[in-house]
Image: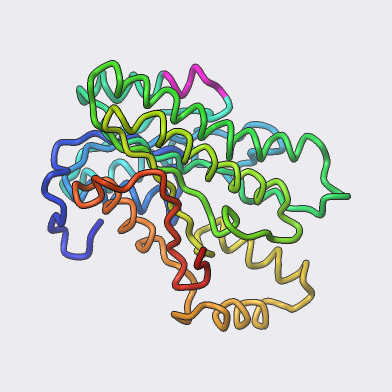
Amino acid sequence: MSTNNTPVYKELAGKVAVITGAGRHQGLGEAMAKRLASEGVKVVITDIGKASGSHMPENAIGSQSEMQQIVDEIRQDGGEAECFVCNMLEASDIEAAAKFAVDTYGSLDIWVNNAGIGYIMNAIVDMPDDDWDAVLGVNLRGVFLGTKYAARVMLKHGIKGKIINIGSQASKSAFAHASAYTASKHGVVGLTRVAAMELGEHGINVNTICPNHVTTGLGAWQNSHFSDVTGKGYEKYMADMRARIPMGRPGLQQDIAKACAFLCSNEAGYITGECMNVSGGEEYH
């Protein structure tokens, strides 16, 4: 939640948001959920709830108990929150999450497509076909489904809502050994632009936030993985990362949460179809 727990965008009070993939502590989803809750938004946190095969192992997903812990923390700070188990590969789950928000809180004003797989990385020649399918399935198809079912609810109820996709620096630039991830995040840019064109006349804003590296739980794994892949070792890898960022540090969860709150606010009412870099100057196109 915001540091002083004082709302910045008072018009957000009473709005209803679904944030996908928000069931892990230290994740971007948790940070965005808590920041929106601090603005008076009623939040529905979704995650897959339990491990599901080799592509969604226990250490990479938000469990039902962890989702509930985050909900409890929001409530303890005076916010309103619920959790809902949702597999982003299942259209029926996503449609049900949108319905749950309306049934529980009476509206669906904000949908944040945050769920993603960023822990399956390999060189193209070594990547199993099913690994590629898993990454594209969650990171791109899941964003399509989230956008589709959120927009359907907003259109049905005449809601001038906000759809926010979480992209990446990899939405703009290529990264070796991350072909599926990079392809999926590039795809989110195209999907965002088309959705903004189609939904703009209905007053629905669609934007993407493109962070550079953030050391979430997933980010810590990426640091270790790419330290090994590049042969640099951890200290050299992290030093090189800081050196190429003009502001001298990787991103923080709160950097993304602040951008999310802004894009949900009236201040961003004329912004749509944008893929906004939040990268300390590392990504500039």
Q: Position of residue 114 (x, y in %)?
A: 46, 43
In the image, is residue 92 part of the stretch drawn in magenta? yes
**Residue 219 or 150: which is nearer the viewer?**
150
Coloring scheme used: rainbow
Whether 239 is drawn above or below 141: the answer is: below
Residue drawn at the location 52% of the way across and 37% of the way down: 191
Residue 105 is left or right of residue 85, and the answer is left
Residue drawn at the location 24% of the way across and 31% of the way down: 160
Q: Position of residue 185 (x, y in %)?
A: 59, 47
**Residue 191 or 76: which is nearer the viewer?**
191
Whether 244 is drawn above or below 73: the answer is: below
Whether 271 is drawn above or below 88: the answer is: below
**Residue 239 or 23: which is nearer the viewer?**
239
Q: Position of residue 119 (x, y in %)?
A: 65, 51
Q: Position of residue 10 (x, y in %)?
A: 11, 49
Whether 48 is drawn above or below 94: the answer is: below
Residue 123 is left or right of residue 169, and the answer is right
Quadrant where the N terminus is found in the figure = bottom left
Which segment did they paint magenta? 90-95
